Image: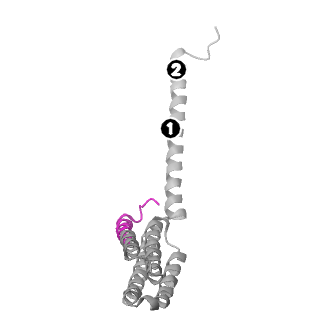
């Protein structure tokens, strides 16, 4: 009978070994979770509050700038909309090329879709397409603008915890 020690000592050693594995596993899990939170917050930082505020202000200013040219273009005759449409296209391109936090990408896309749809409506108007076609494009643009406003509101409320 080769026993290293009394039976109750062997059971205690096995239990202590299992406890050490469990404690080590939990400690490792806590470290991984802490590193994950650190990486998300400080390295990836998909939706920092200041970045969201800055991007929101930019997108809203682009929207206001676009809408002021839009109003002038809406009052133009069919043959004179091309110049203001060129300005609308430039505003749209400037907006599209701007980097925004990942959580604001949908809002930016909705705004640029709104802008492009309005441009297509004016181009259809200049080309003499039917009023129904132009009105349909305007309705589509309204939908994109509503989506932009709603998305912008959601992101401003959830930052910095938005998930892109």
Q: Which stretch is magenta?
A: 145-164
Give the image's coloring scheme. one colour
Q: Does label 1 or label 2 sit earlier along the sequence?
A: 2
Q: Residues within 10 Å of mark 2 (few under 14, many from 20)?
A: few
Q: Quadrant of residue 59?
A: bottom left
In x, y percent, where is residue 124?
46, 78
Q: Mark 2 falls on what kind of element?
A: helix
Q: With respect to residue 5, does 29 lie above or below?
A: below
Q: Residues within 10 Å of mark 1 (few under 14, many from 20)?
A: few
From mark 1 to mark 2, how far is it between C-alphas? 18 Å
**Quadrant occupied by the N terminus:** top right
Asked if disc 1 and disc 2 are in contact, CB closer than 8 Å, the reply is no
Question: Image point 53% across, 79% down: which residue?
Answer: 93
Determine which of the numbered discs, if any, sits on residue 102 in the image: none
Which residue does the numbered mark 2 point to in the structure image?
11
Question: Image point 46% across, 71% down: which residue?
Answer: 113
Q: With respect to residue 39, does 148 lie above or below?
A: below
Question: Image point 49% across, 62% down: which residue?
Answer: 41
In x, y percent, where is residue 117?
45, 74
Left or right of 128: which side holds 43?
right
Question: Image point 55% across, 29% down: which residue?
Answer: 17
Q: Main secondary structure of the magenta part?
A: helix
In x, y percent, where is residue 74?
38, 86
Task: Count up the numbered dots.
Answer: 2
Q: Nearer the viewer, residue 3 or 98?
A: 98
The answer to whether residue 154 is magenta is: yes
Q: Quadrant of residue 78?
A: bottom left
Q: Nearer the viewer, residue 105 or 87?
A: 87
Which residue does the numbered mark 1 point to in the structure image?
23
In x, y percent, where is residue 13?
54, 25
Q: Residue furthest top?
A: 1
């Amino acid at each position: 009978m080769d026993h290293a020690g009394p039976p109750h000592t062997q059971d205690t050693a096995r239990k202590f070994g299992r406890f050490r594995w469990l404690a080590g596993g939990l400690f490792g899990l806590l470290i991984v979770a802490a590193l994950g939170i650190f990486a998300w917050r400080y390295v990836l930082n998909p939706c920092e509050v200041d970045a969201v505020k800055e991007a929101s202000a930019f997108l809203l200013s682009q929207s206001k700038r676009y809408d002021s040219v839009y109003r002038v273009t809406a009052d133009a005759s069919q043959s004179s909309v091309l110049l203001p449409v060129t300005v609308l296209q430039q505003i749209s391109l400037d907006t599209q090329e701007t980097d925004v936090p990942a959580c604001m990408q949908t809002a930016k896309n909705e705004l640029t879709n709104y802008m492009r749809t309005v441009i297509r409506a004016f181009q259809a108007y200049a080309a003499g397409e039917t009023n129904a076609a132009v009105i349909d494009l305007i309705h589509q643009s309204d939908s994109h603008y509503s989506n932009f406003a709603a998305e912008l509101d959601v992101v401003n409320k959830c930052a910095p915890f938005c998930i892109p």
